[in-house]
Image (cartoon, rainbow, N blue to C red):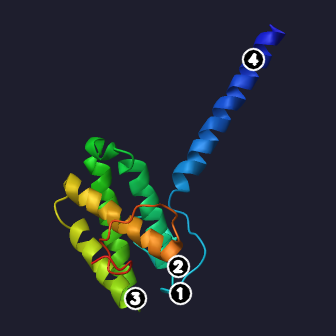
Amino acid sequence: MEHARAMFSIISLLIAATFAALYVYIFSLHTEMEGSKATASKVSAATFPAEYVHVEDFVSDFHAFYNRTTGYGMINRVEMGAQEKQADAASAYINVFLDEGVEHHDLKVDLQAIKLIATSDLDEADVRLLHRYFHDLDKSMNGYDHPDTFGVTETFGGN
């Protein structure tokens, strides 16, 4: 009986730890990172969980989302509802960044291009293109270390 109680306690602790880790992971997907040149005020897109002080942080977080949901051949199994929600968030954040003022001309052009794609009726090709924009911007702005460059951004010198 004592052995059963001990096992039950251990299992309960493991389950609690798993849920705690899951909670931290889910709510840390949109956390802020350090560094920047773009803007000094916090950018919040109302119903979305993160506030960004810097465009670089926004780019990094959104690139991470696309890596998780479309990378490594997952584009053919993409869940469009989640992609549309992310595109809406991207558009909302970009609106605020543009309103606050983006000094770098090429970055402004890239953000406007992302917004144009994000506000269209998304299909898999659009989602792939959004991923590529965020990928190249992340390489250019944050030093994201990956051998591929897609050449879709003005900022990275692709267009």
Q: Which mark is residue 7?
A: 4
Residue 40 marker: 1
Q: Earlier in the sequence, mark 3 or mark 2?
A: 2
Q: Is residue 112 above or below residue 135?
A: below
Front-lying residue, 56 or 18 = 56
Examine the rendering and report whether any part of residue 94 can be seen: yes
Q: Would residue 28 appear left or right of 132 to someone viewing this image?
A: right
Q: For the residues marked 4 and 1, what is the alpha-carbon distance in whole angstroms? A: 52 Å
Q: Residues within 10 Å of mark 3 (few under 14, many from 20)?
A: some
Label 1 residue SS: loop
Is the C terminus in the top left, top right, bottom left or bottom right quadrant?
bottom left
Quadrant of the rendering where the N terminus is positioned: top right
The dot on residue 102 is: 3
> x, y percentage for residue 79?
29, 45
What is the spatial separation of the Cα atoms under label 3 and label 1, in whole angstroms? 11 Å
Q: What residue is at 34 percent from the left and 44 percent from the top?
A: 73
Q: Residue at x 34, y 68 (%)?
A: 133
Q: Is residue 81 left or right of residue 138?
A: left
**Which secondary structure, mark 3?**
loop
Q: CA distance from mark 3 to mark 4?
A: 57 Å
Q: Amino acid at mark 2?
A: Val
Q: Amino acid at mark 3?
A: Val
Q: CA distance from mark 4 to mark 2?
A: 47 Å
The answer to whether mark 2 and mark 1 are in CB contact below 8 A is yes
| Residue shown at 69% from the left, 27% from the top | 12
Whether label 3 touches label 1, CB < 8 Å: no
Mark toward the viewer: 3 or 1: 3
Circle 2 sits on which residue?
53
> Tag 2 or tag 4, which sits nearer the N-term?
4
